[in-house]
Amino acid sequence: MSRVEEIEAAIDGLPPEEYRCIVQWFRVREQERWDAQMDGDSAAGKLDFLFDEAERESAADLLREWPSHE
C-alpha cells in the first residue's frame, strides 16, 4: 500500500469532527499554496500582461465597475 493509500484509508476512518478539521486544514493549505504561486508569478512578471491589458482598456474607456452598481 502506498503512502497516499494509507493516508486515504486513515482519512476515511476519521470521525466526522476530525474529518472536518482535516478538510479545513487542506483548504487553508491550498489557499496558502495558491497565494505563494500568485506572488511568485507576479514577482517574476508572469502577470504583467494583465496590467498591460487593463491599462489599454482603461485608456480606451472600456472598463466598468465590478460588481456593477446599477
Image (spheres, helix red, strand yellow):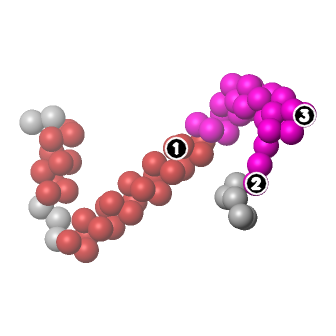
Q: Which residue is mark 1?
A: 33
- Judge from the rendering whether residue 65 lies leftward or rightward of residue 9; answer left or right: right
- Give the alpha-carbon distance from disc 3 to disc 2, as whole Å: 15 Å
Look at the image and say whether residue 33 sits in the magenta stretch.
Answer: no
* Structural distance between the alpha carbons of marks 1 and 3: 34 Å
Packing grade of label 3 (10 A; few <14, some 14-19, many >=20) is: few
Q: Main secondary structure of the magenta part?
A: helix
Q: Give the image location of residue 69, x and y in percent.
A: 72, 64
Residue at numbered disc 3: 59
Q: CA distance from mark 1 to mark 2?
A: 29 Å
The answer to whether residue 25 is visible is yes
Q: Label 3's element?
A: helix
**Residue 41 is one of the magenta-drawn residues:** yes
Tell me where the magenta segment starts and ends, as one range.
37-65
Is tag 1's residue or tag 2's residue first in the polypeptide sequence? Answer: 1
The residue that appears at 12% across and 61% down in the rendered structure is 13
Q: Which quarter of the picture shows residue 68?
A: bottom right
Q: Which residue is mark 2?
A: 65
Spot occupied by residue 41 in the image (x, y as percentages of width and height): 66, 31
Q: Is residue 27 left or right of residue 4?
A: right
Residue type (three-letter) at the residue carrying disc 1: Arg
